[in-house]
Image: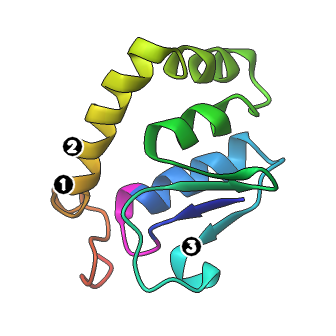
Amino acid sequence: MVVYDGDCGICEASAGWIIAHIPVVDVVSHHQYGLTHIGSVWFVTDNGRLEGAAAISAILKLANARVYRAIGVVIGLPGVLFIAGLVYALVARNRRHISRLLGMNACGLPPR
């Protein structure tokens, strides 16, 4: 199961992409999961929970398209995962501003 920030435009768009391209996973907002807030995407399985870049890597590995699965494998490589984690943290910290700049819903803002 993928749990995403239901108040973030980037997160909502990403969740829609996952639904369209990786139908084997359930996708729910943090509200639906029973959380009041979430700092990064979660990938919850019977074996535990991954967050951030590690979650993205694991999710992509389940995609129908070979190219997305390959991207997931590359992101999961030790050095790449470290860098992806830094990039993910930067985007996550600024997701509200980025969403607003892209004309998407941003936490607490009414839809455009």
Secondary-structure class at tag 1: loop
Please name the residue that numbered disc 2 is placed on.
Answer: 90
Q: Is residue 108 magenta?
A: no
Please name the residue that numbered disc 3 is placed on.
Answer: 29
Q: Amino acid at mark 2?
A: Leu
Instruction: Give x and y (percent) for residue 15.
Output: 57, 56
Color scheme of the displayed model: rainbow
Please name the residue that numbered disc 1 is placed on.
Answer: 94
Q: Amino acid at mark 3?
A: Ser
- Circle 2/circle 1 CB separation < 8 Å: yes
Location of the C terminus (image quadrant)? bottom left
Location of the N terminus (image quadrant)? bottom right
Q: Residue at x 36, y 28 (%)?
A: 84
Question: Real-space Cα distance between discs 2 and 3?
Answer: 21 Å
Q: Amino acid at mark 1?
A: Asn
Q: Is residue 107 above or below residue 88?
A: below
Which residues make up the magenta segment? Answer: 6-10
Say left or right for 30 vs 100.
right
Instruction: Give x and y (percent) for residue 25.
Output: 78, 52
Question: Real-space Cα distance between discs 2 and 1?
Answer: 6 Å
Q: Is residue 48 above or below residue 22?
A: below
Q: Residue at x 64, y 47 (%)?
A: 18
Instruction: Give x and y (percent) for residue 26.
Output: 76, 60
Q: Is residue 9 magenta?
A: yes
Say left or right for 112 vs 32.
left
Query: Label 1 neighbourhood size at 10 Å, few (<14), some (14-19), many (20+)?
Result: few
Q: Residue at x 41, y 57 (%)?
A: 40
